[in-house]
Image (tube, coloured by chain):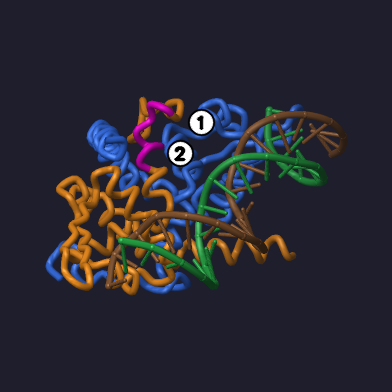
Chain colours: A orange, B blue, C brown, D green
Amino acid sequence: MNGPFAGTVVLPAEQCPVRDVLDRLGDAWSFLVVLRLTAGPHRFNALRRAVDGISQRMLTVTLRSLERDGLVSRQVFPTTPPQVEYTLTEMGWSLAEPMRVLTHWASANHDRIRAARGAYDAERDA
Amino acid sequence: MNGPFAGTVVLPAEQCPVRDVLDRLGDAWSFLVVLRLTAGPHRFNALRRAVDGISQRMLTVTLRSLERDGLVSRQVFPTTPPQVEYTLTEMGWSLAEPMRVLTHWASANHDRIRAARGAYDAERDA
DNA sequence: CCGAATCCAATGGGATACTG
DNA sequence: CAGTATCCCATTGGATTCGG
C-alpha cells in the first residue's frame, strides 16, 4: 500500500460515500445536467435543448433526483404559462471543482483513450 | 454565463470527451476497480474480494474495457496455476488525482446528501 | 410551458455451470 | 486460478399520450 489512496477501503455499498455519489453522477445525465447548470439557472426546455440528446422523461427524472439530493433547487413562477427555473444549490456548486478536474482530465485524455481502443481492437482482429 | 464553466458546451455524444469518460467511469464498477488498483497491482480474485459485491462476470467485463481503454494493463504469468496481474497504466494513474478530488467531495458531502434525501422524502409523505 | 403516466424494447447484471 | 458461456429477471430509457 503506497499509492495516494493508501488505506482507501472499498466499503460495502450501504455505507460507501463513493458509491452513493457514483450512483448519482454515474448516470451520465446527472453529471451533464449539473455541468450545464454551472452556466446559470435554466428553465426546463432551455435545459432540454442545452443537454444534447436527453429525452423529456430523463430530464424530469434526473432533475427530481438531483433535487432530492439537495444539489438542485426548483422554483416555480405561477405565471401563464407557468415557468420553472432550476438552479444549483450551494452543495451543487461545491461539485463544480471536482467536476472541473474530471472534465479537464477527460478532455486531455480523450484522444489517448480512443487511440488505445483502436489499438486494442486492431489486435483482436489480427 | 459567468460560472467557472462559462463557455462549456455539452456536445453531441460522439465528440464529447466528458460523455466518453462518463460512459466508462459512470458505471460504478470501473471507478471502484481503478480506485482499488491505486493501492497496487492485484490478481483477479484479490481484486474480486477487495471490491465488495462485484460479481465475477462484472469484474471480467470491467477489466476488459479498462484494458481496452488503456487504463489497466493485464500481465499473465504462465505458472501452474496461472497467475494474472492487473496494474494501472500511466494513464490509469493520471486518473488518480481527479478521482481523489471526487472521492473527497463524496466523503465530505455524504451526510448532507443523505439528510437532503430524508427531508425531501419526509416532505412528500406529508 | 412543464411534466406525469403508460407502454415497450433494449440493456445490464446476478446466478450458475463449465473449461484450460 | 482465471476466466467463458448461458439463462433469465430487473432496470433503463425512448416514444407517445394526456393533464394543469
Say which residue label 1 marks.
Answer: B51
Label 1 amino acid?
Val
Earlier residue among tags 1 and 2: 2
Is B36 situated above or below A113?
above
On the image, which quarter does residue A121 sit in?
Answer: bottom right
Closest to the observer, A113 or B90? A113
On the image, which quarter does residue D10 sit in?
Answer: top right
Query: Could you say where residue C1 lies in the image, as x and y percent from the top left?
Result: 27, 72
> Looking at this rendering, what residue extends furthest in the left direction?
B2
Whether A20 is among the magenta residues is yes
Q: Which residues are magenta?
A: A14-21
Whether B9 is among the magenta residues is no
Q: Are marks 1 and 2 in contact (CB under 8 Å)?
A: yes
Q: Residue at x 47, y 37 (%)?
A: B37
Q: Is residue B26 left or right of residue D3?
A: left
Q: Is residue B117 left or right of residue A115?
A: left
Q: Residue at x 57, y 51 (%)?
A: B67
Query: Could you say where residue D9 lies in the image, as x and y percent from the top left?
Result: 68, 39
Quarter of the image where the N terminus of chain B is located:
bottom left
Closest to the observer, A57 or B123? B123
Say which residue label 2 marks.
Answer: B32
- In terms of secondary structure, where does tag 2 sit? helix
Question: Can residue B32 be seen in the rendering of this structure?
Answer: yes
- In terms of secondary structure, where does tag 1 sit? loop
